[in-house]
Image: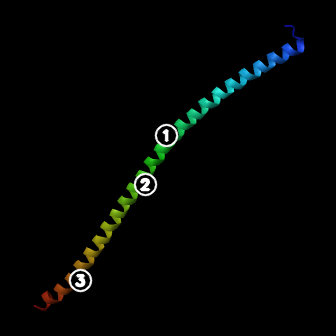
Amino acid sequence: MHMDLPQIILLIVIIVVSVILVIIGVQIIGLLKDAKATMKKADLILEDVGFLSRSLTRGSSTISHLFTSLESGMQLVGMVTKLVAPKSSKK
């Protein structure tokens, strides 16, 4: 089989381009795997942030209820003091 020089050069170029495309494909697959791992880590971080924000919201809600209860208790003490004070001052 006798091939001309342009056919040999064309065959070599086709082989080189094919090898380069295979290498690029392997690199892209590696990048996609790394991106998937990074996305999983980011998802875990976002879940942790969501848990922390829910915990802080729950904590601030509890503190708010505590202050509201204390305020109501102080109002009750004030009302009882007003009711008891006139009776003790009349004696």
At a point 59% along the width and 34% down the height, the residue shown is: 32
Instruction: Kindly identify the amino acid type of the residue bearing the numbered disc 3.
Output: Met
Q: Distance between the residues labelled 1 and 2?
A: 18 Å
The label nearer to you, 1 versus 2, is 1
Mark sitting earlier along the chain (1/3): 1
At a point 87% along the width and 10% down the height, the residue shown is: 3
Q: In which quarter of the image is residue 27?
A: top right
Q: Distance between the residues labelled 1 and 3?
A: 57 Å
| Residue of label 1 | 41
Residue 65 place in picture, x, y as percent = 32, 67
The label nearer to you, 3 versus 2, is 2
Q: In this view, does 49 lie above or below 77?
A: above
Q: How far apart are marks 3 and 2 (CA)?
A: 39 Å
Q: Residue 53 carries which label?
A: 2
Residues packed near mark 2 inside 10 Å, few (<14), some (14 to 19) or many (20 plus):
few
Contact, mark 1 vs mark 2 (Cβ under 8 Å): no
Q: In this view, does 83 lie above or below 33?
A: below
Q: Is residue 79 left or right of residue 4?
A: left
Q: Which mark is residue 79?
A: 3
Q: In front here: 59 or 88?
A: 59
Q: Residue 89 carries which label?
A: none
Mark sitting earlier along the chain (3/2): 2
Residue 66 place in picture, x, y as percent = 30, 66
Indicate the secondary structure of the residue bearing disc 2: helix
Residue 6 place in picture, x, y as percent = 89, 15
Q: In front here: 42 or 2?
A: 2
Q: Is residue 6 left or right of residue 36?
A: right
Q: Is residue 78 left or right of residue 44?
A: left
Among all residues in the image, which is located at the extreme top? Answer: 1
